[in-house]
Structure formats: structure tokens, C-alpha cells
Image (cartoon, rainbow, N blue to C red):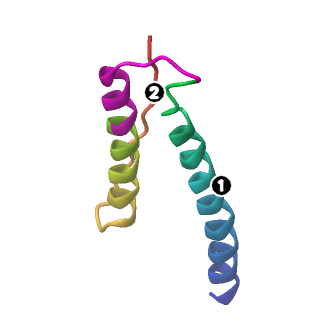
């Protein structure tokens, strides 16, 4: 049991740290001097990130539902 906990803690620290860094990098896309984007693009990005977080919440809940999704802007 203790080994499973140690593995969880190690991987959670690594994966959440990487995810937070990638979210920070997505935030860098808000630089209008470097990028051209619409409000619709912004809504799509935020909606996709919110859906991903909601999917994580659901997977950690009692139901354990799997919600895999992708993302694409045209």
C-alpha cells in the first residue's frame, strides 16, 4: 500500500507540475503583439481547458468516468 502511495505522490508532483507549466505557456499566447487571435479562439481555448479539468474531477470522483477529448482551432 505504501509503495502505491509513494508512486502516486511522485507521479502527481511530476505530472501536475508539467501541466501547470504547459498552461502557463498557453497563457503566453495572449500576447497580441506576437499573435493574432479572436475572442472565439479565446473562448475555445478556455472551454477546452475547463472541460479537461472537469474530466479530471469526474475521474477522481466516485463515478470514475473517463472523458477523453482533443482540441483544435481552425
Report x, y in % for residue 61.
32, 66
Instruction: Identify the residue under disc 2.
Output: 71
Mark identifier at residue 18: 1
Instruction: Please name the residue shown 44% across and 17% down the image.
Output: 73
Report x, y in % for residue 15.
64, 59
- Marks counted in the figure total 2
Position of 29 with respect to 73 (left or right) is right
- Label 1: element kind: helix
Toward the top, the furthest residue is: 74
Instruction: Please name the residue shown 53% across and 32% down the image.
Output: 29
Given residues 73 and 68, the one toward you in this image is 73
Report x, y in % for residue 64.
36, 59
Q: Tag 1: Cα neighbours inside 10 Å, few (<14), some, or many (≥20)?
A: few
Toward the front, the furthest residue is: 33
If the image is split into quadrants, where does the N terminus sit? bottom right
Q: Which of marks 2 and 1 precedes in the sequence?
A: 1
Residue 43 belongs to magenta span:
yes
Are discs 1 and 2 less than 8 Å apart at CB? no
Report x, y in % for residue 20.
57, 55
Q: Which residues are magenta?
A: 34-46
Q: Tag 2: Cα neighbours inside 10 Å, few (<14), some, or many (≥20)?
A: few
If the image is split into quadrants, where does the C terminus sit? top left
Given residues 32 and 29, the one toward you in this image is 32
Amino acid at each position: 500500500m505504501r509503495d502505491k502511495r509513494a508512486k502516486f505522490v511522485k507521479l502527481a508532483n511530476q505530472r501536475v507540475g508539467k501541466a501547470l507549466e504547459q498552461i502557463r505557456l498557453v497563457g503566453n499566447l495572449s500576447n497580441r503583439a506576437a499573435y493574432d487571435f479572436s475572442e472565439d479562439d479565446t473562448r475555445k481555448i478556455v472551454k477546452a481547458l475547463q472541460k479537461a479539468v472537469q474530466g479530471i474531477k469526474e475521474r477522481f470522483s466516485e463515478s470514475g468516468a473517463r472523458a477523453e477529448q482533443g482540441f483544435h482551432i481552425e
